[in-house]
Structures are given as structure tokens and as C-alpha cells.
Amino acid sequence: MTKETICCSECCLGIELGSTRIKAVLIDSTHAPVAMGVHDWENRLENGVWTYHMEDVWQGVQDAFADLRKNVKEQYGVELTRLAGIGISAMMHGYLPFDAKGTLLAPFRTWRNTMTAQAAEELTELFRFNVPQRWSIAHLYQAILNREAHVKDVAFLTTLAGYVHWKLTGRKVLGVGDASGMFPIDSETMDYDSRMADAFDEKTAPMHFGWKLREILPKVLNAGEDAGTLTEEGAKLLDPTGTLEAGIPICPPEGDAGTGMAATNSVAVRTGNVSAGTSVFAMVVLEKPLSRVYPEIDMVTTPSGKPVAMVHCNNCTSDINAWAKMLYEFTGAAGLDMQKGDVYTALFNAAMKGEADCGGVLNYSYLSGEPITGMEEGRPMLVRLPAASFSFANCARSLVYGAIVTLKLGMDILARENVRMDSLLGHGGFFKTPGTAQKLLAGALDTPVSVMKTAGEGGPWGMALLAAYRVRREEGETLESYLTSKVFADSEGVTIEPDPEDVKGFASYARRFEEGLAAEKAAVTALKV
């Protein structure tokens, strides 16, 4: 069945450029994953800017696709030459400005940077709409405020997913969900908010740039719309061997938030999901607007344009990864024969045995800045009270708590707004060890958390689903209906209810965490990078 599917070009491919891994997932006509390819990479801190080089982007995309093609050949004995559809997704936001010749005008500034505070504050006041620091429009306006010479030459501004899609298809477009992280979207028109765009142009008119905002932004497309096909040049970029054929339909490129919503069937009103990896964010599809603007809450959209409240935190598993690496090195020094994955399993399992409030141990996982708590930079820090019970279990639990405590502070705002959720699903690497992080997150948010069997596939699988929707949807069929009836009708998952002791313990931990933020700020001031 799978071999025939691949030979008959019925498979769809999703590629997602995440913070630490580029992953390609191939799905068959039943939407089940049948093969995968990966490439590990890491951002660089250069001249105070978190960035990736463009050559690293293409090396990574090509390696991930080559790994996928090799795995298809080994598992099914066929060459991957043709596909039914392709979708590209990546980290949202950031700054990728190009001139009229397609030359990148400044190093890629990723979502992780917290250098646009002045711009974000001024635009939030101008638009009467929260503009976070990592949004593309904040980066553009900060460059204007900084009088950066390249701004006058900007002819096209896009996201990482939009850039890769552009090079594969020649089309300067963006899915509405990813576009909503560049500039505010009007969910009625499914386009950039015209009032705010006009306000921005009026604000910048005295600078006499040769462009208007809407002229340099990608065209906004809804899920399922025609976003072009793989060109001959694009096929060679994706697969330098020349095996992959051109002409394959490609769906609108999306951000990792949108693919997470698709992967968890969280695109309908009153559904929500938590995506936890290098960063962590919760998305809740709203049934009514919030009562006011909150600097801690982003307003974005689903891939089909519905308004979403997003709580985004820059830091999640990076500090856990650093501790796991150190512990793995310890096992080697001790002469123990352990795999790196065993260290993660041991760490998360130990966390389940720690005291509900971590016994006086606190972890600040801030590798970078964290706007929700007012941190422009971060210094990872483990702190314990003198009388703390400094056991491995409590330390491990504090690492897990440290990864999600800032998310809790943001989600408390939605709780006070009486935002209702019929379901909250978790996905991403944070949930790989069954029943551990899921249980602790349920306690942290005091709400049931579900994880489906497909949770480990995450965003790349969600992007493949959006590609399938582009080529297989029936006329008039909504994304919500397609996912519910054709993808998740028989899905299996596990739901964990919040444990009252976990709820109480995490609340105590969160209070101490907030009280100790002064120490984190002092560390940033005292310890210069």
C-alpha cells in the first residue's frame, strides 16, 4: 500500500525549519507518516544578534530531504521522484529584508532577539494592538528608528518560511497564520489590517522611503489556496541530485504556530494547544475578543484566519538540553553505558518523584530574554534556599517547572478573561517521555492536557496535512471539517487531569519564581556576555 502510494505520487511532504532541527515528514493518502528526514542545526549569537546563515538554511533543507529520500529507498525500495503536494513551515516572525535584486540586506534576525523594545512599544500605542518584539514589523520599525542605511532599499520583507517558499516557487506569498506574526491581520478581510498599515505609512512618511508597507509584505493566502508549484530551479534547490521532479503543487507557507494547530486539530473555536520545544507557546482559538490589549498576549490567527490568543515564551527546553548534555557527559566519565535518550528519560521520570513545589529549588531557564517577565537578556540559573531539599528528583522537577512557569504566568491572563477551552493538546519534544511533562503541565495550568500518538511528529506533520488539504479538499470544505472528519476521526490520545497536589505545588513554585526574578535581573546586569 505505502510503496504503491509513493510510486503513484499520492504522498504529501511537510518540511519545517525549527530552532534546532529541520525535519521533513512524508505522509500517505491516509495522512499517516510513512518516512522522515532530519537535519540538526543551531542558531548563532553574532554581534549580539541571534541568527542563522542562509547557506545553513539550504544545507539543512537539502540534508533533511536527502535523509528522507534515503529512508524511503531503504524502507520501500523506491525513489522519491514525485509528490502530490509540498508545504514549507518555519519559525515565525523575525527579519529577512531583501532589495529589488533579491539580495539579503541584513543578517537574519530571528524571533529570539529582544532588541526592538522601543519599536514594539511605539507600534502597540499607534495601532492600539499588541505588537511583540519578535514580530517582523517591530524589527522593521526598530531598524528605521536606528537609522539603518539598508531600510531605504527594502523591496521585500518576509519570514523564514516565506523565504524558502519564494525560492522554491518564485511566489512572494505567506499563509495567513505566518503573516499574522509579521503584521496584524483583519480576520474579516483575511489580509493585513488596512487601518494599521495606513497608520504605519503615515508614521514613516517623513522618512521618504520609496515604498509603502503593503508593497513590501508577502501576499496573504488562506489555507488551501494556490501558492504556486515547485519550479525547475526550486526542485534543484531542494534536491540537488535532480531526482525530484518539478511541477508539484505547494500550499501556502506557514509558521510553526499554525502547523502546531493543524497537528493537534486545534483550529476550531475553543480549542487550544501547547507547543513545547526550544520555545513554548500556547494557542487558544477565541470565541470573542479580549477585553483589552495585553502586552503578554499576541493576537495571531489559525491557518484559516480565525483569531487566536497566543502566549509565547522564548525559553523552554534549551536549559533542559544543556543539563542533559552535562549529565550524559557524567555517565561517560563514570564509565556507564547509556544513550543520550536514556538521560532524558531518567531526568523526566525523576521529576515525577520530586516534591510538588520542588522543595525550595528554583530554575531560571532563560538562555535568552523573556518579554513576559520583562527580561531583555537571560542568564540560566539554578537557585536553592539554604534549607532546600536538593535531591536529584527535586532538581529534575525544577528543570521541567522552569521550562513552563513563564507560560503559566501568561495563561493566567486568559483565565482572568474567562477564555474557555474545550480541549488543550500538547505536542513537541517536551512531551516525548509519556505521561511526565504532560502531567506536570496539567498541574501548572490546572486544566486537562491531552497528547495524541502523533504528538511527536509535531509541526512537520501538521505542514504535510496542510499540503494534503491544498490538493485533496473538496469544494467548500473548511480546514476545520477536513481535519476533524478526514484526519483525526479515529485518532488516539491520552488525557491527564490536573492533580490537586501538583496544582498547589506549582502555584507555590510560581510565586517563588516571580519573587526571585530580581536575582535573574541582577545576574544579567552583573554578568556581561
Image (tube, rainbow, N blue to C red):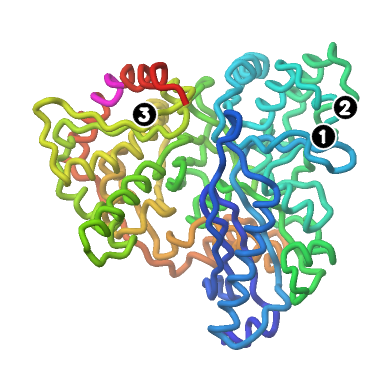
The answer to whether 305 appears left or right of 320 in the picture is right
Tell me how far mark 2 sits from mark 1, CA to CA: 7 Å
**Residue 284: percent from left, percent from top:** 48, 40
* Magenta span includes 180: no
Tell me how far mark 2 sits from mark 3, CA to CA: 40 Å
97 or 425: nearer the viewer: 97
**Residue ID for mark 3:** 409
Secondary structure beneath disc 1? helix
Report the residue that reaches farthest toward the top: 206
Count of numbered tags: 3
**Residue ID for mark 2:** 211
**Residue 476: percent from left, percent from top:** 70, 59
Answer with the quarter of the image where residue 230 lies.
Answer: bottom right
Callout 3 environment at 10 Å: few (<14), some (14 to 19), or many (20+)?
A: some
Tell me how far mark 3 sits from mark 1, CA to CA: 36 Å
Residue drawn at x 80%, y 38% is 98
Check residue 291 in the rendering and tell me which mark sits there, or answer none: none
413 or 210: nearer the viewer: 210
